Image: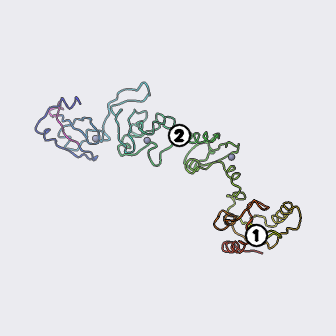
């Protein structure tokens, strides 16, 4: 503010002329102070650069030479090193920049990107989390920032580093008493990078970053163990030939639906389980029908039939009968058969 108080005025400055620079910012003359040779040095403010006062001659202003930070050629004066952070300081440091979603503060710089200094910023939002955003994690050149490009977590796709990904993942792991092992490829490259970890039940897991953090994928083994319906699903075999079968059982008003990769073996297993459940051999399997399709088609249909679609089979009670959750009321048989025939090919 002292700068403005000490300014002198003349006819030119009192008119408060404005100049639009080639960088799009608007400069307003507010007075003059001192000379450069024979030319008065006019004081200007910039609509982009805040309260700070810059100096330029009338000739330079007319010639479109930008005296403020909007020019990539603006030279900041060096102010040594910060004893606390070790960063190099200059006159740009301390500047606050409104980034729309947050406000950046220029903390200093420690390396160059080409000819440009790579400045380190703090973000009014992200830097509150100093584990995820330690000093140095938010950095960009001045021109990147003046173009409004966010380089912190406030942007839709933050440029996460491997260290930041590990912080995010380990936080989630600790919430479910799980243990970080390491990156599958030794390092993080993209959100598809996979890492190894051990769930609270001791299962060895491998999950990609996106599935883990954004889709909430956790231990696959636990998932299948906790959801009996998922038994029998082999995602990596989804295109293999698979069989859906249905059969009736003598003496009961339920029929069974199931799937198998090996259709000859499964039938014998089923009869054995029925015999041992009823403790006799009178409950013979009959009316066996087989259908074929890909594993994914067969699995999906089986899930639909055994009751995931409650609207179709809402009165089915697996607990009353042998053989798991794959029994369906006999009165639903025709309806069930129609659905199967619409989807899979019948075989003999
Ligand atoms: Zn400016
Ligand atoms: Zn931020
Ligand atoms: Zn598990």
- In this view, the residue in front, 39 or 157, is 157
Which is closer to the viewer, label 2 or label 1? 1
Q: x, y (%) of residue 68?
A: 27, 38
Dot 1 alpha-carbon crowd within 10 angstroms: few under 14, some 14 to 19, many 20 or more: many
Name the residue: 72% across, 59% down. 232
Residue 29 sits inside the magenta stretch:
yes
Q: Could you tell me if residue 295 is visible in this image?
A: no
On screen, residue 183 above or below 310: above
Name the residue: 17% across, 35% down. 31
Residue 143: mark in rendering: none
Give the quadrant of the N terminus.
Answer: top left
- In this view, the residue in front, 162 or 286, is 286
Q: Which residue is mark 1?
A: 246
N-term-proximal mark, 2 vs 1: 2
- The quadrant where ligand 1 appears is top left
Determine the image quadrant of residue 170.
Answer: top right
Q: Main secondary structure of the magenta part?
A: strand
Q: x, y (%) of residue 295?
A: 69, 64
Residue 141 sits inside the magenta stretch:
no
Element at label 1: strand
User: Residues under labels 2 and 1: Cα distance?
Assistant: 52 Å
Which segment did they paint magenta? 27-40
Q: Residue furthest top?
A: 83
Q: Could you tell me if residue 200 is visible in this image?
A: yes
Q: x, y (%) of residue 348?
A: 78, 75
182 relative position to 160: left or right: right
Q: Which residue is mark 2?
A: 164
Determine the image quadrant of residue 115.
Answer: top left
Dot 2 alpha-carbon crowd within 10 angstroms: few under 14, some 14 to 19, many 20 or more: some
Give the mark count: 2
Determine the image quadrant of residue 204.
Answer: top right
């Amino acid at each position: 503010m002292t700068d403005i108080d000490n300014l002198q005025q003349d006819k030119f400055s009192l008119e408060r002329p404005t100049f639009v620079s080639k960088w799009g910012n608007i400069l307003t003359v507010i007075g003059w102070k001192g000379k450069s040779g024979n030319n008065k040095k006019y004081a200007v403010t910039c609509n982009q650069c805040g309260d700070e006062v810059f100096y330029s001659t009338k000739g330079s202003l007319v010639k479109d030479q930008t005296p403020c930070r909007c020019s990539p050629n603006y030279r900041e004066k060096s102010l040594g090193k910060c004893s606390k952070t070790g960063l190099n300081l200059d006159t740009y440091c301390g500047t606050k920049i409104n980034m729309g979603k947050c406000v950046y503060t220029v903390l200093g710089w420690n390396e160059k990107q080409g000819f440009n200094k790579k400045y380190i910023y703090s973000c009014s939002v992200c830097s509150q989390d100093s584990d995820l955003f330690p000093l140095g994690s938010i950095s960009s050149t001045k021109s990147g920032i003046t173009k409004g490009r966010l380089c912190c977590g406030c942007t839709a796709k933050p440029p996460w580093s491997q260290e930041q990904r590990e912080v995010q993942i380990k936080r989630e792991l600790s919430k479910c008493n799980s243990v970080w092992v390491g990156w599958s490829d030794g390092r993080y490259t993209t959100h598809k990078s996979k890492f190894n970890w051990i769930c609270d039940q001791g299962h060895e897991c491998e999950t990609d970053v996106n599935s883990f953090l954004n889709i909430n994928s956790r231990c696959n083994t636990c998932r299948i163990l906790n959801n009996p319906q998922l038994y029998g699903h082999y995602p990596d075999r989804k295109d293999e030939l698979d069989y859906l079968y249905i059969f009736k059982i003598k003496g009961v008003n339920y029929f069974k639906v199931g799937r198998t990769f090996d259709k000859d073996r499964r039938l014998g297993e089923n009869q054995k389980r029925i015999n041992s459940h009823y403790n006799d051999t009178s409950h013979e399997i009959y009316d066996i029908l087989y259908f074929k399709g890909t594993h994914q088609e067969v699995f999906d249909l089986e899930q639909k039939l055994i009751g995931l679609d409650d609207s179709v089979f809402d009165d089915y009670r697996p607990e009353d009968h042998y053989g798991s959750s794959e029994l369906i009321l006999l009165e639903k048989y025709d309806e069930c058969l129609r659905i199967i025939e619409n989807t899979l090919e019948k075989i003999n």
